Amino acid sequence: MMNPNADAVRTAEIQPAEALETPDLDLRTTGRARHFLRDREIYSERDDADHVFKVEAGVVRTYKLLRDGRRQVYAFHGPGSLFGLEIGKAYCLSAAAASDCSVISYERRQLERLAAQSERLSLELYLTVLRSLDRAQQHSLSLGRRSATEKLAIFLMNSTELPIVGTDILLAMSRKDIADHLGLTIETVSRTFSDLEERAFIEIKGARRVCLVDVAGLRELCA
Amino acid sequence: MMNPNADAVRTAEIQPAEALETPDLDLRTTGRARHFLRDREIYSERDDADHVFKVEAGVVRTYKLLRDGRRQVYAFHGPGSLFGLEIGKAYCLSAAAASDCSVISYERRQLERLAAQSERLSLELYLTVLRSLDRAQQHSLSLGRRSATEKLAIFLMNSTELPIVGTDILLAMSRKDIADHLGLTIETVSRTFSDLEERAFIEIKGARRVCLVDVAGLRELCA
DNA sequence: CGATTGCTTGATACCTCTCAACCCAGGTGG
DNA sequence: CCACCTGGGTTGAGAGGTATCAAGCAATCG
């Protein structure tokens, strides 16, 4: 059940390729490819949780809305990442495309059947959830005890998994997505970006394109 | 692997009795009872994760320390709750007694062996982790997007699981524990308690004893 | 008792939010 | 081609909530 050999957990803002990278053949055949344009909803909190998803390309965000419109983005899922695993009948989060993306959907009941038969698949599911838990906890640390600058530095350092062009990273998500992920406002995110640039930690080459000039310094900011 | 029958997830600040409540006999025999005085460390981040624990009595906190002394408390575990499940070799959080408490420790390797044999045990472990994930996400929502008043209201409403005397709840943890859990300072927690009392939502009968006078109102505060 | 510890209360500072204006790139249509 | 519009991002000024620093209080313990 638990794997003592799986070593130090990587903590990435964008959930990277992980479980099911080399999936059982069964699984590959049962999935169905789907595409979503940016900001399209994939599923909504309270919907019947009858599917589990894996990202093929692009980035998906999972989030929750409060009555007054405040939004908390829990995680960004990049290619290879699984999302939509649930205990109960319904999803307890919403999921939407943070960028144009394609995902594979698996029928939950089918996946359950397969997992019951395959020791290996069920272990992978277990590890997937455990990894998500680890990330959620890291995220709590970011939200609870850190300044805007620290939050953004952490976010950037954990975004190293993103598409890279030369030394630059490309952010798939909007300022609002970042803000709602870090518990800040768009304005503060923007100001903090500018601040990091003035202090020569990064260079902003476009709203979605950032060069990490001083990685050591950024890491230092993460305390 | 996944259980479609396990319905709506309870979200409690204090992790309640859940998995292993009716444990396999094997498990019961392998556990070893241990006692800890308040604030004693049970394990530390980076220690070898060779044991898994279940709370028998009292409350345990899992937490992490930053270099500058800031502390984030991730969760409080009450009687019946499992903690210490890990992917990697080492614990990625620390655990300590929030109040005097007794826990049962299981050898991880033994638990792994048992889980490999018992469909039921491995399912319970899976669900335990999934539940923890759900709580961690709820917690992120509290940390990221809420005012001190909302945070404390949520905390109190989720503490209904606590020992109750009449209509009062008894808080097992200190103000500092609460503060570090909610991402606030002790002073703000204290002020917010007072504020809630002035507004007649609660009555403070002692530092650790609170009467929830207006439950409907408190629930309203949770938005 | 005096000392210690945990909690409460007060005054002020600081960080982030709020509201508002502005900028810029992309798309549309005359 | 350019005027216009639109949406996302940036920047500014002021307000507000929480942190910080400091003092005071109550309970516990030697």
Image: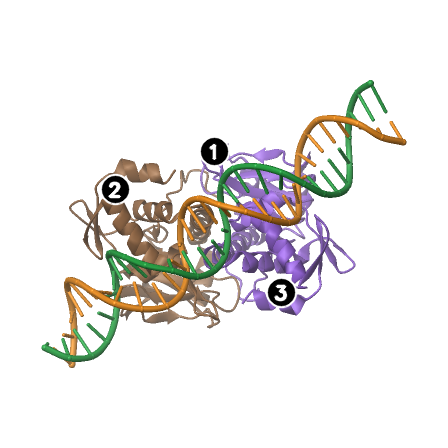
Chain colours: A purple, B brown, C green, D orange
- Dots 1 and 2 on the same chain: no
Residue B130, position in %: x, y? 46, 49
Q: Amino acid at mark 3?
A: Leu
| Residue B179 location, quadrant | bottom left
Residue visible at 48% across and 65% down? B92
Tell me the subunit letter for badge 1. A
The secondary element bearing badge 1 is classed as loop
For the residues labelled 2 and 3, the Cα–Cα distance comes to: 44 Å
Q: Is residue A31 visible?
A: no
Location of residue B177 in the rendering, given as x and y in whole percent from the top left corner: 34, 61
Residue A89: x and y in percent read 46, 36
Residue B199 badge: 2
Labels 2 and 3 in the same subunit: no
> x and y percent of residue A183 in the render?
51, 49
Q: State the residue in front, A18 or B187.
A: B187
Q: Residues within 10 Å of mark 2 (few under 14, many from 20)?
A: few
Give yes or no for contact between labels 2 and 3 (Cβ–Cβ under 8 Å).
no
Q: Earlier in the sequence, mark 3 or mark 1?
A: 1
Q: Which residue is mark 1?
A: A46
Question: Quick check: A211 above or below B130?
Answer: below
Amino acid carrying mark 1 in the image? Arg
Chain under numbered label 3: A
Q: Which residue is mark 3?
A: A218
Local crowd size for mark 3, using a 10 Å CA cut-off: few (<14), some (14–19), many (≥20): many
In 3D space, how far apart are the residues under numbered discs 3 and 1 (Cα atoms)?
39 Å
**Residue at x-position 62% and y-position 45%:** A175
Mark 2 vs mark 3: give the one in front: 2
Q: Amino acid at mark 2?
A: Arg
Answer left or right for D4 relative to B9.
Answer: right
Question: In front: mark 1 or mark 2?
Answer: 2
Q: Chain of mark 2?
A: B
